Structure formats: C-alpha cells, structure tokens
DNA sequence: AAAGCCTCCGAAAACCTTTTCGGAACGCCG
DNA sequence: CGGCGTTCCGAAAAGGTTTTCGGAGGCTTT
C-alpha cells in the first residue's frame, strides 16, 4: 500500500478528496465508509480503496459537531501523585479504551479554582461525561459549575446523595481482614490503624470490630490511630508488645504500617507468622512482596472500581442516570505473613 | 447570577442564542466575547451579560474545525502502572494545563497493536501533537503510523535519531552518586546494580565507574547485576560483606535494592552511615523516607522531564521541530544513609 | 410498450464558530 | 447641504462530516 507521507503542513485528506478520487459524491463516500445501505458493493470497494490510498481518517471534530456526541469523557482527579488515583484511572481507561471513547485527563491538585477551570474546559470540549476521582474516601463537595452531562464520583463520594458515587467497601474490608485472621486460628488480635482523620481508617475499624464481636472476641488493646507510615508502625508495635505480650495477630492500617510492625517484631524476636500474624491494607505490591515474609493484605480492587465507574458513566450517557453510593468489594490477598507459604 | 440548570437533554446554549438575547448578530457576539475590535463598549457589555445568563461556553469542536488547531495533545504511555510514567505525565499535564491545552491520555500496555489503534484515534481527533512515554530508558521503535503532527519521545528515546527524544541523564546520575559518596569521605565503594538488561542500569554503572576512575579509585568487588527488588539487595549485600568486609559505601541500583541492603547491614551489625554509607536510585519517597535511616537517593527529575517534553512539543507545534536526544539532569537528594542527619 | 418498483447516487441542509468584507449611520469640514 | 472619514454592525463563507430526500436509471410485469 502506497503510504502517503503527507509532507508536514499539508492538509490531511478529507472526505471530499476521497470522493473525488473515487469519482463519487461525498454523500456516497460517507455512506460507503460507514457501512450504510444504498451503496453498491463495487462503489463501496472503490471508495474504500481511495480512502486507504489517501490514508483518510475522518475528522472527529466535524463528526462530533454534527452528532452532538464526541466520544470523549473527562477524568478529573484531585491528586495524580497519590497512589489511589492511578489504578482507578487505569481501570477507567481500560473500560473506555475498549470502546471508541477517548479520555481527557485533568489534575486539579486539590484546588477548587483549578477544578472549576478544568470542568469549564472539558465542557467546552463537549465531553459526553465526567468521572471525578477523589484522593481519599472522605466525601467531597459536588462539582461547583452547572454541568449538563452525567457525572460519576469515584473513590471519594459526592456529598450530594443525588449524585452517583462508587467507593470501596472499607467496612467490608475490615470485616474481611479479621475473618481471615480468625480463619488462621488467631484469637488475640490487635489493630494498629492509620490516620484517624480519614474515614477509610475509621470504616475499616468499624468492620473489624464488628467481625471480632460476631466471633465472640475482643480486640487486644485499644485501636491505635496514628499515621499511614512505617515509622508509626514501628513505634506502635513496640508499645503493643510492651502492654500485650501475648498478641498473636496484628491488623495494620496500611501496608507501610505493616512493614514497620514487621520490623519491630523481628527486632523483638517474634516469628511471623508462627508467633504473630501480620496483615496490611491496600495491597501495594512493592510493599507486600518486598517484605519478609511477604505480606498478606486487603486489595481494594481499585482497577475494578475504575471500570465500574466507567461502565456507570456509559449507562448514564446512553440511558438513565443512577443515584446514590455503590460500593465495590475488596478482597484478601494471602501471603506468608499470615499463612505458611504454599 | 441566575444559574440556568439546563434540563438534561436540552441543547447547550450556542452563540446564536447569545446573539439573539443580546439583540445583535452572531458575528458581533463573537467579536465581543473574543475581545476583537470594532465593537462598542456598550454592546460588548450587553453580549457578555447575555452569555453569562445563558452560561454560554463556546463549542471547541466548531472552533477547532475552523482553526485547524484543537488545543489538544495526546499522551501515549506504554505502562501507566509503572511508577516512572506517572511523574512524567504529571509534569506534562502541568506544563500544558497552565495554558489552554487539554490532554488525551492513552495507555497502550506495551502492545503495538493497541498503540497503533490509539494513535489512529488521536489523529482522528486532530490532536496538535503527541508525547510518547516509554516504560524504560531503552530505545523504542518510532510510531508505526504516518503521523503528520509533531511527536516527542519521553523517557524512552526513539530508535530513529531524527526524532526528538528527552531522557534522563543516567550516566551523569551514576557519576553524581559516586561523587557524593566520595565527598562523604568514602573510598571503598561497591555497586550493587539492578537488572543488567536495562540500559538505565548499565548507563549508571558507566557513570559511576568513570567517576571512581577520575578519583583514582577502583570499585570494591565486581559490579553486581540482578533485579530491581529488595530481595536481590538483601542477597547481594550478604555476598558483598562476606567477600569485602571493609567496604564503606554501597551504591544501589534502585531504592528497593537499597532497602534490602540496609536490612542485611543491620542484621550484620553494621551501622549506617557510620560504618557503611548506602545510596539508592529513583528517589521514591515511600521507600526513602520509610527507611531507617532515611535513604539518600538520586532523583531523575521526571516531572521536569515531563515538563520539558511538553515545552518541546509546544515549540514543535508553533515553530520548527527539534531532533536528537536531549537529557535532563538528575540530582542527589541527601538523607541520613550517607550523612549524619542535619 | 407502458407503468411501476427497486436500487443506487447526489444535492443540500445541518452542526457552531470565526473572519472578512461590505454597508450603514454619524459627525465634521468645506 | 454634500462629501468624507470614522465607527460600528451584519451577511456570508468556510471548515468536514452525516443525513435526508429527491431524482435517475434499470428491470419486471401486464
């Protein structure tokens, strides 16, 4: 096939060019290329050939202008750097990319002004819908501007219950984690959580306590809130071992906290998982598989969450708009820190 | 201001609506809103008012169709999950977002077919330019399709020297790292690298050896290639200490490797940084600040790299297209693992 | 042979904005 | 009062595609 390198600056081929080369009208060319009826096979063939020869690619702008649909969506994140946005974004990109949708990415950096500006730009580009990704699971105010396209909130729910939000089931995650520890035969379970200012931390605690309660157990020591970091894990584990030497499992607020806990346990001569089982949250690969032993963790299924958000947006574009908060299930990923390696 | 909630399905306001409301022609309305001349102040005011009342937002599609410029660029990454794409992407988004550009994000997942498909989609959306982000610093084949817009390759250079590529200066990074260790008074320096299949690893070794050589030093032991992970760091450090007990500094191929090395050093009773200084690469915050002591590392300035790529693309769009490979300087971030805490 | 139907194709409108150019109104000077 | 310059506004075209609708031609049937 003779590739036409299109010297820089030369206008891209248009449908008119194709029609001319094929010796038909633009209307016929359009119908031929789009598989519409009322075109003979021979003509269709001729047009296709002409299009290939000119490496014709239809101008989506013109198409979108006419159809009122652009086949684009906006992905508005508030902190791209945070490690939770990325998997969600991937999942969404995945679900969209499979179809014919393209994604505009915007990072508002947690700044309301910048957010408004981006929303404005996206609307002016006539996106068919918007996904708003929060940076924590705490509810966030809905978009300020009057938006006339469907919006789905992901990770952080909207404060307005009339909006559609898709969030991880943190309460279920806490419950799941404790049930796993109990299934491993542990009964003296402590919980070193993360930053209590986050609803994610508090929700997980709620679920964990509920599961303990249902099993007729009580937590060992108080639930300890601190930060999400390794240092907190090391410190909190030290205090825990001083006060409750007979603890046989520690559920941690994050994988980083768990890494700190593992460190302290090793220093104090406790074997993991034989003496104490340890479990993290978030299933951050680099943390869990680098640990000794490898860390059992709870995966929030963020990619799936992103895909769900994308699908929900699809539905809202095509049909009716859903409302309320939907949750995505988490899952336990078992590794050596709670069970002997397989 | 009376917000017009625009009942779902109702067409967005167009310039014609604004003109009608203001009692002028669309031409005048356009000129008024775009600050063109030949419009009286009073008329301009009336139009602005009408536009605000209808919350008019100009249709970028129509504008782009006419201008031949869309104000959009495509960002084509090959693995979004990798932690190097993200900062680059942020930098690019940053540089673009400051202006009036919007970014189409596409993840090809390292698949050539998918890549072609995405390029096709982007071209059909008439992007003004393309940034191609690689997943490693190894050269990659140029885009398959005939592309008539400027392209800038970031992180992974194109194999075609006629293309413009922007990459981190890994050789300089290796040199810099060794110079820092020497400045800290170390003379018996070992290098536990990463995966030797990556040019990033080999380039850093090249730079490190050059710097050692210039200082009249030789590396302690052989350069050890392995993987980028913690486990390799632990193992390699063990072997190193067995063979070269008097080592006083270890330069590591990645922050994860360095974490493993730190682990082994602590187990063997070596103090860091008093007995042995340790240094990583990549400056991955969660790794460096969670370490004990905090890890000195080399930052590849990826955000700056992304910004550079965006700026280069700007220039290529507006003026002439550059060629060849440009490098972005790295920088040493000093923390406790090489110098006493400040 | 005439009428009618089916198949295929083309002209033109529509989408929305920007820009160019002609025209209208008005004030000032001769 | 007429001519001229200035200032402001509007008609129309352009950009590329899709869709509607009318028309032309060929084939079948009576």
Image (cartoon, coloured by chain):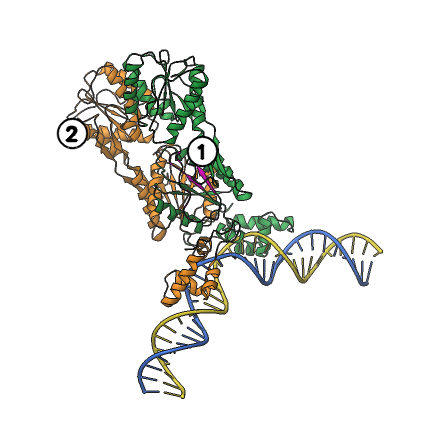
Chain colours: A green, B orange, C blue, D yellow
Residue at mark 1: A167
Residue A240 visible to the viewer: yes
Nearer to the camera, A73 or B210 = A73
Kindly identify which residue carries mark 2. B183
- The answer to if A136 sits in the magenta stretch is yes
Provide the major secondary structure of the magenta segment: loop
Q: Which residue is at a point 16% across and 27% down the rendered structure image?
A: B184
Q: Is residue D20 above or below residue A204?
A: below
Q: Nearer the viewer, mark 2 or mark 1?
A: 1
Q: Quadrant of the N terminus of chain B?
A: bottom left
Where residue D1 appears, as percent x and y from the top left, is 40, 88
Residue at 28% from the left image edge and 37% from the top image edge: B301
- Please name whichever residue, B52 or A71, is drawn nearer the observer in this view of the structure: B52
Within the image, what quadrant is residue B33 found in? Answer: bottom left
Q: Position of residue A321 (x, y in %)?
A: 52, 42
What crowding class fits label 1: few (fewer than 14 Cα within 10 Å), some (14-19), or many (20 or more)?
many
Locate residue B287 relative to residue D30 in the image: left or right: left
| Residue extent of the magenta highlight | A131-154
Secondary structure beneath label 1: strand
Which chain letter goes with mark 1?
A: A
Residue density around tag 2, few if under 14, some if 14–19, many if 20 or more, within 10 Å: few
Of residue A55 and residue B114, the one placed in the foreground of this image is B114
Drawn side of residue A163 relative to residue D18, left or right = left
Percent of width and height locating residue A342? 43, 14
Which of the 4 image quarters holds residue A181?
top left
- Up-down relation of residue A178 to residue A111 (above or below): above
Q: Residue at x 41, y 22 (%)?
A: A208
In three-dimensional space, the C-alpha distance between marks 2 and 1, rounded to whole angstroms, equals 50 Å
Quadrant in the picture for the C terminus of chain B: top left
Q: Which mark is residue B268?
A: none
**Camera sees residue B164:** no
| Chain under disc 2 | B
């Amino acid at each position: 096939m003779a590739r036409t390198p299109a010297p820089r600056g030369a206008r891209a081929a248009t449908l008119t060019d194709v029609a001319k080369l094929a010796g038909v009208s633009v209307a016929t060319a359009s119908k031929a290329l789009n598989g519409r009826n009322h075109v003979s096979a021979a003509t269709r063939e001729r047009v296709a050939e002409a299009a290939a020869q000119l490496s014709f690619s239809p101008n989506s702008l013109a198409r979108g202008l006419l159809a009122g649909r652009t086949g684009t969506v906006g992905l508005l994140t508030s902190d791209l750097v945070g490690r939770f946005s990325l998997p969600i974004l991937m999942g969404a990109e995945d679900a969209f990319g499979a179809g014919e949708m393209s994604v505009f990415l915007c990072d508002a950096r947690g700044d309301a002004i910048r957010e408004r500006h981006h929303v404005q730009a996206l609307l002016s580009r006539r996106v068919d819908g918007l996904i708003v990704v929060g940076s924590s699971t705490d509810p966030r105010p809905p978009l300020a501007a009057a938006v006339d396209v469907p919006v789905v909130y992901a990770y952080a729910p909207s404060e307005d219950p009339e909006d559609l939000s898709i969030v991880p089931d943190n309460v279920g995650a806490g419950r799941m984690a404790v049930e796993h520890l109990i299934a491993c035969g542990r009964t003296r379970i402590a919980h070193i959580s993360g930053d209590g200012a986050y609803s994610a931390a508090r929700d997980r605690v709620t679920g964990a306590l509920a599961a303990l309660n249902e099993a007729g157990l009580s937590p060992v020591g108080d639930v300890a809130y601190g930060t999400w970091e390794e240092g907190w894990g090391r410190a909190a584990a030290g205090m825990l071992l001083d006060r409750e030497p007979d603890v046989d499992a520690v559920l941690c607020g994050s994988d980083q906290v768990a890494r700190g806990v593992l460190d302290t346990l090793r220093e104090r001569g406790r074997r993991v998982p034989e003496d104490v089982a340890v479990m993290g949250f978030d299933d951050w690969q680099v943390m869990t598989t680098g640990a000794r032993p490898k860390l059992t963790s709870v995966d929030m299924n963020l990619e799936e969450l992103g895909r769900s958000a994308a699908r929900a947006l699809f539905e809202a574009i095509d049909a009716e708009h859903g409302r309320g908060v939907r949750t995505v299930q988490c899952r336990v990923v078992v590794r050596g820190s709670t069970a002997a390696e397989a």
